[in-house]
Image (cartoon, rainbow, N blue to C red):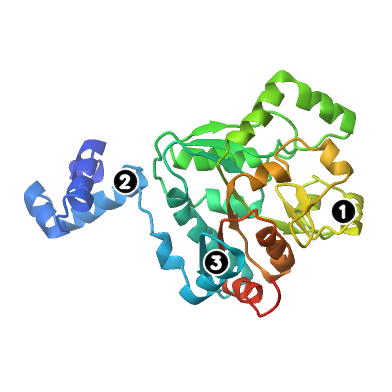
Amino acid sequence: MARANHPSDRIVAEIAWLYYIKGYNQAEIAKRMNLSRPTVITYLRLARERQIVGVKIAGLHFRVNDLADALCARYGLQSAYVVPEAESALETAYQVCEAAAQFLPDFVSTSDTLGVSWGQTVSFVSERVPWWPVQGLVVRQLIGSLANPLLPTCESCTTEIARRLSAQCINLNAPAVCSDAGLAAQLRAEPIIAQQLDRLLDCNKAIYSLSPCTLDTHVVQFNLATEADISDYRAKGAVGIIAGRFIDPEGVPVLGDLDRRMIGADQECLRGMEGLLVVTGLPKMEATRAALRGGYVNHVVLDTALAEELTRNRPA
């Protein structure tokens, strides 16, 4: 009885090996190991809970072919994953993030450097990434730190993704935004920070979400920008925000005072990476279209309603 209640990792790993690798069914394992079938089922569950095995769902199963193909054709994407809408906007967001999390281990490869942004969507993704080691993977923080540790910050998203993929995690040891442009320039010139910013160019891939350039954007809610900042960028034509950076309807960078006070990857740096965009909700349609037009996105995971709006017959 003690063996069933408190099995060692060794016996649990042996059961998992027989089931997942050797292809034995539960009855065969029970006979081979002199166990009951319910005990084998329990050990297989423990193998997942103890992270002895990682279970990953192939991203192809989240693809709605017609919409995905239309998105790829219109915007020159390498892949698109369209997730059916759920009963509520929140549940839809969860399912989109789950799909992105399952795709992420396929998105990165051995010895890649993955840049990670911040926000609620990226946080949801990070919490759902399967335990799936990727050899030689490096995960870097794309934007500096925020003041409130309870918010889904860039460093928390970076750390969690790195942990689940058994990757090296490199955080950006600087504030995301400074109160003064001169202070930000001095910090960017500090050797340790300057080196970290230079190494962001090593990121060949990136994962991020985006937000519309509106007064209720999470960039304001998280005190990265003020309503006055947003109004200034809107007046200059900005419609979307990616990793704290502003873009117009064509994806062209929109610059302002906040850029001089920020520490993190800029638009040019982001464009140099193979980008995975995770986004949900029609309010983000204009910002999403801008990011697609601007060349920031190579792969996208989104909901059906947003995908349908992005593929309507209108000039791309």
Kindly report the distance in space between the C-alpha atoms of the residues bearing marks 3 and 2. 34 Å
Describe residue 84's horizontal placement relative to residue 221 as left or right: left
Foreground tag (3 vs 1): 3
Determine the image quadrant of residue 177: top right
Q: Which of 191 and 292 is in front in this view?
A: 292
Give residue 138's position: percent from left, percent from top. Answer: 50, 35
- Residue in the image at 59% along x and 45% along y: 273
- Please report whichever mark, 3 or 2, sits nearer to the chain's N-terminal start: 2
- Residue in the image at 57% along x and 38% along y: 203
Neighbor class of circle 2 (other Cα within 10 Å; few <14, some 14-19, many 20+) is: many
For residue 53, which numbered disc appears in the image? Answer: 2
Q: Read off the residue under disc 3.
A: 72
Looking at the rendered structure, the number of numbered marks drawn on it comes to: 3
The amino acid beneath tag 1 is Tyr
Q: Nearer the viewer, residue 109 or 279?
A: 109
For residue 233, which numbered disc appears in the image? Answer: 1
The amino acid beneath tag 2 is Val
Determine the image quadrant of residue 308: bottom right
Describe residue 165's horizontal placement relative to residue 27 as left or right: right
Residue 244: tell me if it is visible: yes
